[in-house]
Image: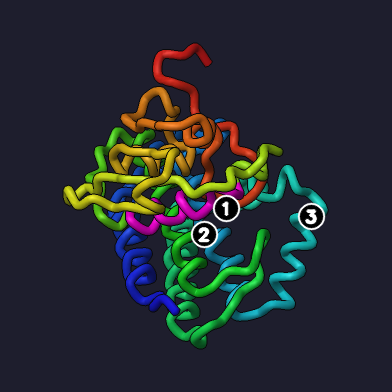
Amino acid sequence: MADPTPVIDDLRAESEELDLIVAELSPEQWALATPAPGWTVAHQIAHLAWTDHSSVLAVTDHDAFSREVEKALAAPGDFVDEGAEDGARKPPERLLADWRAGREALEKALRAAPEGARFPWYGPPMSTASMATARLMETWAHGMDVAEALGVERTPTDRLRHIARLGVRTRDFAFGVHGMSVPFEEFRVELTAPSGELWTYGPEDAADRVTGPALDFCLLVTQRAHRSDLALRAAGPDADRWLDIAQAFAGPPGKGRQAKGDTP
């Protein structure tokens, strides 16, 4: 059984890096539009705070989390946006304090979770490591939106290995959620990490392959960039289809991002 400590440590580091970006923002900067339609910088952080709160309930109070799921089922198309909107209305200092408190509570809960624990979620139940990985993915992805809105250049790190692995593992989910037949054979995925290390997944002799920078793969599976703007290569028809639909997050198919230069 995988030790969740490394991914929990990396989740903390990812959150702290984003915190440094937003800690001293002016009210005007909190209100800047991000690439997500209708979402400001405040909405992005509010969404992270809201999801951290839900995650804490999933880990520590299953009954309370079940009530949150009931709310989501009652408004499946709106509950995520409503959670972000509620948080974005708060004064920036309150929003920032709530996000910090929530992520600290989640870290403590994950570190205290018993070995082999499984937690309910809006999709399939998750292990401690899976929960931390999902939170790291979202923190990184929404942090990219925040950075773009503020004109901040972020340096990629090898913390991306957790997101890359999740992106590979959710291949079948991406096909299924699009109503497409899941390929029977595994793919070979070879990604160049920010450090220069080669991360590999799947059999070496697989007929279908995906290669390229790990950063680009993570941008693709979190749908933070259009495939045509990324240096990813697919060999084989199934791998090629995958790069058009890949998503590492739960829920219905994401709308993705437009290619650079496309008219909105």
Residue 218 vertical position relative to residue 36 in the rendered view, above or below: below
Which disc is residue 87 wearing? Answer: 1
Quarter of the view holding residue 23: bottom left
Q: Residue at x 26, y 43 (%)?
A: 154
Residue sitting at x 36%, y 60%: 15
Q: Amino acid at mark 2?
A: Ala
Mark sitting earlier along the chain (1/2): 2
Which residue is drawn at the image coordinates 43% and 72% (left, top)? 104
Q: Nearer the viewer, mark 1 or mark 3?
A: 3
**What's under tag 1, amino acid-wise?**
Gly
Q: In the rendering, which numbered label is found on residue 73?
A: 3
Q: Position of residue 143 (x, y in %)?
A: 39, 47
Q: Looking at this rendering, what residue extends furthest in the front direction?
A: 205
Gap between marks 1 and 3 measured at Cα: 20 Å
User: Would you say the residues marked 1 and 3 are in contact, meaning their CB atoms lie under 8 Å apart?
Assistant: no
Q: Nearer the viewer, mark 1 or mark 2?
A: 2
Q: Secondary structure at mark 1?
A: helix
- Marks 1,2: beta carbons within 8 A: yes
Q: Residues within 10 Å of mark 2 (few under 14, many from 20)?
A: many
> In the image, which residues are magenta?
161-173
Q: Is residue 176 magenta?
A: no
Residue 211: % across, % down: 33, 38
Label 3, secondary structure: give it: helix
